[in-house]
Image: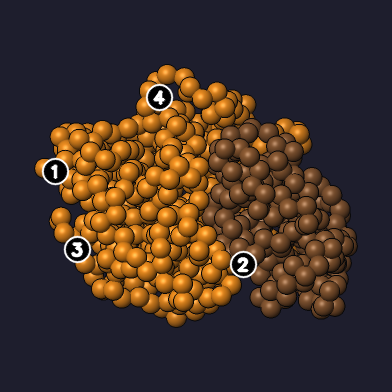
Amino acid sequence: MKQKFDIIKSTCVPLPLENVDTDQIIPARFLKATTKEEKFFGDNLFRDWRYNPDGSLNTSFVLNDPTYGGEILVAGKNFGSGSSREHAAWAIAGYGFRVVISSFFADIHKNNELNNFVLPVVVSEQFLSELFASIKANPKMEVVVDLPNQTVTNTATGKTEHFEINGYKKHCLMNGLDDIDYLLTVKDKTEAYEKTAAKY
Amino acid sequence: MNTLFDKIWDSHVVSIVPDGPTQLYIDRLYAHEVTSPQAFDGLRARKLKCFRPEKIYCMPDHNTPTHDQDKPIEDPVSKTQVDALARNAKEFGLNHFGMFDKNNGIIHVVGPEKALTLPGMTIVCGDSHTSTHGAMGAVAFGIGTSEVEMVMASECILQQKPKSMRIRVEGTLAKGVTAKDVALYLMSKISTSGATGYFVEYAGSAVKNLTMEGRLTLCNLSIEMGARGGMIAPDETTFEYLKGREYAPKGEAWDKAVAYWKTLKSDDDAVFDKELVYDAADIRPMITYGTNPGMGMSIDDNIPTLDTVDAAGQASYLKSLDYMGFKPGEKLLGKKIDYVFLGACTNGRIEDFRAFASLVKGKKKADNVVAWLVPGSWLVLDQIKKEGLDKELEAAGFAIRQPGCSACLAMNDDKVPAGKYSVSTSNRNFEGRQGPGARTLLCSPLVAAAAAVTGVITDPRELL
């Protein structure tokens, strides 16, 4: 899952719902897996919205609509609330999304996306609502997410917005490094802390 | 001028990554069977051991059946996951309280009741309800599986320091109003994202007067406001609760610990990024009507009408009410229900069983209701028996099951069928949370008890 990130230009899948919780992204019954098979989680992304209770395809759900596709998921505010399950990030990555754009992300899920080389891009409410409108007007419209310059561009309106990411995490994403790689290099600092300051 | 949170966080900073997060030292890692297997796989792939195995406590809770725990789990997939935790704990030399072991229970119930959670600690677990432990005056928060692996490998985590928020609830809670109602009230006011990006300290006289169990319930639900975690300054209530418990410091070490714990409070001149104040007298017994925990109201109110919802949120609001089978503007009182669930890391403690029993005592379970009463741990179950609550509950037609997360997220066989209404003391009413198609109404143990004996949504104050 460690893939180097640079500039992504892609069409988008719109999900204009708010408060999409991680129970919807991947329901609890799929958390029993003891391995991290991308295909398994990707196949069950938004399972109960993608399929009807009888197992048939819910053709009105956006993932089943051939009009839309691409590596960018665009969702309403407070995306990824609720359970800390990283399986939600595995499902998003496993399905093939590399970027999620929203006006607001839940904290734990945002970290989980970053730790799986999926980039959460926070945009303003106005940029988001225009983006939904642009995608609806032209599903083939592309969005450019430029990590080196920290910008996101709606090519339909030509509008660009800056997004935040700390320098360390940006470096990790662009170079395919993760936090454990880093933490293993600073074990001496941890041991020094334990000797001088740890209380428990 | 430091906050309680600052004091604990700052004393755990190992280093600060240039233009990046903080390297934070972790005192306690709890692990359950659902969010740990891939972390152990990661360690194996990198040929790593756990850096400080003695600080890690593992216990299965999500998949455990609530009956016949002395027998193998029937569901082979659940069994595989529970067995994997036991095997991994053994391979990596970690503490493990297996299923049917009298130390077992829901991790967020067991940690505090055994005093594995102590004031001043930093605590993480691959579970969003880790916020529960903040009630003891700890900095505790939920993390993902990559982060679990990170802590196993290094005893540290990389995190941005969150902003600080204090929520004060002042005054006296009315009869029939519990810590759960306080939490559901706060969520209904600030929404499920109102505290995202913040670490919350709860204060004020109504919070100060909560019992330890009540505080655990309140902090448990911090994540449902979006908060990174929630905490309460340790005080005599905390010390009284901890003293003599299994892993609490003893003798001289206890006195020394208490002296330190007494310093763990926000300074008088501490500045919070955000401060909210509520009047306890405004809070009535609460219930949710929608599909996120912020969609709650006083039990005797009407469901909000569509014009009270902002334009961007209306599609979600209608989808939610459609799922629940409710209409904007209608009342919930008197509506027939099907299931009652008492339990979960939110309300599976002894006080919750006392509250439930106090209301149903001398009455009978309604015939149309299936009730699942699931203690949070074997210690809670022992206490229920010691106090004779099991006999009172049995006389009223209720059976007590064996401990675990149970119907809170239905990973075991306690699933609410599609379309059925479940009045539940758990923490989430998301679509499908208690089983595909299940409709969950969150509430306190008293509201659940009132529904259990009447078969319809009932204001518990009428029965107290």
- Quickly name the residue at label 1: B363
Q: Where is residue B82 in the image (x, y as percent from the top left)?
A: 53, 29
Mark 1 and 3 residues: CB-CB less than 8 Å, in contact? Answer: no
The residue under label 1 is which amino acid type? Answer: Lys
Say which label, 4 or 1, has the lower sequence index: 4
Q: Measure how far apart labels 2 and 1 are at the Cα level.
A: 46 Å
Mark 2 and 4 residues: CB-CB less than 8 Å, in contact? Answer: no
- Quickly name the residue at label 3: B175
The image quadrant of residue B338 is top left
Callout 2 secondary element = loop
Colour in which chain A is shown? brown
Q: Position of residue B32 (x, y in %)?
A: 53, 38
Category of crowding for the residue at label 2, using alpha-carbon neighbours closer than 10 angstroms: few (below 14), some (14–19), many (at least 20): many
- Determine if marks 2 and 1 fall on one subunit: no
Colour in which chain B is shown? orange
- Quickly name the residue at label 2: A77
The residue under label 2 is which amino acid type? Answer: Lys
Q: Where is residue B90 in the image (x, y as percent from the top left)?
A: 58, 26
Can residue A83 be seen in the rendering of this structure?
A: yes
- Which residue corresponds to the image point at 81% horizontal and 67% vertical from the top-left? A138
Question: Mark 2 belongs to which subunit?
Answer: A
